[in-house]
Amino acid sequence: MEFNDLAQMVISGDHTGTEAWTRKALDSGVEPSAIIESGLIPGMDEVGRRFKSAEYHMPEVLIAARAMKASLVLVRPLVTASGIEPKGRVAIGTVRGDLHDIGKNLVGMMLEGAGYEVNDLGANVAPEAFVDAVENGGADLIALSALLTTTMPMMQRTIEALTAAEVRDRVGVMVGGAPVNQAYADQVGADAYAPDSATAVEVADALMKARAGK
Ligand code: B1M
């Protein structure tokens, strides 16, 4: 089976195709991790590239993410069971008071597709839940999303809670969401800002690398 076929189905958003391809591949003994690394990641990489160059817009990205997810739901339990270490563990959530979760879900899916173990804490997430994800969930990275100017300050509150619980130096904090920018990320003491879901993967990779070098 050609991994490129799977990648192309992700790019074109063919979710019935990715599901059928994946079932067939698993039945014929293809390594689950190879499906992610050689099919889904290259596919989503290309989607990210097209999104950045404005060739794709949000609907195409969402449709591609759905196609990726149709494969990933079949593969993920097998990868987890096989004990292959994820690239890193990310706890993602929309901050307290904010119910917008579409962008956050997209970022989570992209990170998952790129080989991260993603603990999706949902929307309207209290700072304490992020602290718990580091203390007890072993998160290497925290990804905070906010869509409202009124909930952006909750990013700072969450980072302060991590500091108060003395776990701030154990975790990389990245922030994103339509009203957020690099200057705001710097202001609230985040380690990184990602403007979109494709960049979020690059930012997470860079943060993991920086942390490994510490
Ligand atoms: Co709301 N809403 N909304 N809303 N809503 C906005 C955000 C708003 C800009 C609309 C407007 O007035 N033009 C406005 C905010 C204004 C402001 O704060 N300045 C607004 C408002 C005011 C509200 C309410 C207060 C309305 C009301 O009740 N009076 C209310 C608040 C509820 C609450 O949260 N407490 C509200 C409610 C809702 C709905 C529930 C109806 C619904 C949300 C449904 C859901 O998410 N399940 C909704 C929606 C859909 C929107 C708009 C239309 C679309 C948001 C969206 O999903 N975009 C939005 C207007 C708009 O943006 N055009 C609006 C698509 C998504 C893929 O993009 O989320 O930006 P986005 O994510 C991107 C990047 O930002 C980035 O990557 C994603 C993919 O590239 N990113 C990250 C996001 N999170 C990241 C995290 C990272 C990294 C990157 O981690 C590191």
Image: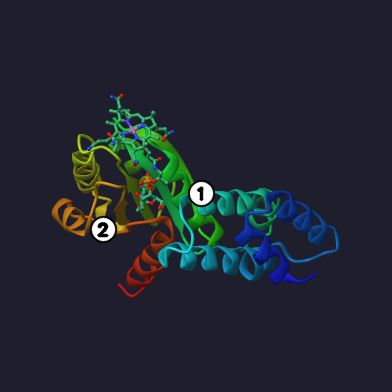
Q: Amino acid at mark 1?
A: Pro
Is disc 2's CB within 8 Å of ligand 1? no
The x, y position of residue 171, in whole percent, is 32, 56
Q: Residue furthest front?
A: 55
Q: Secondary structure at mark 1?
A: helix
For ligand 1, which image quadrant applies? Answer: top left
User: Could you say which is closer to the camera, residue 212 or residue 47?
Assistant: 47
Residue 202, quarter of picture: bottom left
**Residue marked by disc 1:** 59
Q: Residues within 10 Å of mark 1 (few under 14, many from 20)?
A: few
CB under 8 Å between discs 2 and 1 = no
The x, y position of residue 62, in whole percent, is 53, 49
User: Could you say which is closer to the camera, residue 115 or residue 4?
Assistant: 4
Residue at horizontal 25 percent and vertical 42 percent from the top: 158
The x, y position of residue 67, in whole percent, is 64, 52
**Residue marked by disc 2:** 169
In the displayed structure, would residue 190 be above or below residue 137?
Answer: below
Is disc 1's CB within 8 Å of ligand 1? no
Residue 136 at least partly seen: no
Q: CA distance from mark 2 to mark 1?
A: 37 Å
Please state if 192 lies on the left or on the right of 34 as rendered. Answer: left
Residue at horizontal 42 percent and vertical 68 percent from the top: 53
Q: Secondary structure at mark 2?
A: helix
Q: Amino acid at mark 2?
A: Asp
